[in-house]
Amino acid sequence: IHTSSQSSPMQAYNQAINDLDRELDYLKNAFQ
């Protein structure tokens, strides 16, 4: 997925990692 805000593969990779971190935080809170 490419958007105007992701001008390089590394930026897209970092965004994906940030999204995964948010998902993990949500899941940890949900199952506490």
Image (spheres, helix red, strand yellow):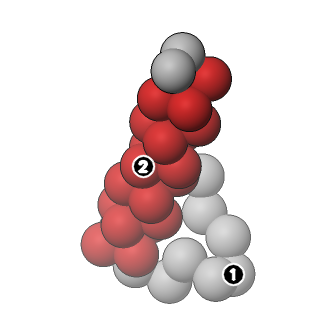
Is 23 above or below relative to 18? above
Can residue 27 be seen here? The reply is no
Taking the spot 49% from the left edge, 42% from the top edge, the residue there is 25
Q: Residue furthest top?
A: 31
How far apart are labels 1 and 2 at the CA level? 22 Å
Mark 1 residue element: loop
Q: Quadrant of residue 24?
A: top left
Q: Residue furthest front?
A: 32
Nearer to me, 29 or 10? 29
Is 10 above or below relative to 19? below
Residue 27 in picture, x, y percent from top left:
54, 26
Locate residue 24 relative to residue 4 in the image: left or right.
Answer: left
Nearer to me, 24 or 12? 24
For label 1, the residue is: 4
Residue 1 in picture, x, y percent from top left:
60, 52
Nearer to me, 24 or 29? 29
Can residue 5 be seen here? The reply is yes
Locate residue 1 relative to residue 10 in the image: left or right.
Answer: right
Taking the spot 64% from the left edge, 83% from the top edge, the residue there is 5
Q: Residue furthest right?
A: 4
Locate residue 29 relative to residue 13 in the image: left or right.
Answer: right
Residue 19 in picture, x, y percent from top left:
52, 51
* Circle 1: residue type: Ser
Residue 23 in picture, x, y percent from top left:
54, 38
- How many numbered markers are drawn? 2
Taking the spot 60% from the left edge, 63% from the top edge, the residue there is 2
For label 2, the residue is: 21
Q: Quadrant of residue 14?
A: bottom left
Mark 2 residue element: helix
- How packed mark 2 is, by other alpha carbons closer than 10 Å (few <14, some 14-19, many 20 or more), is few
* Circle 2: residue type: Asp
Taking the spot 45% from the left edge, 59% from the top edge, the residue there is 18
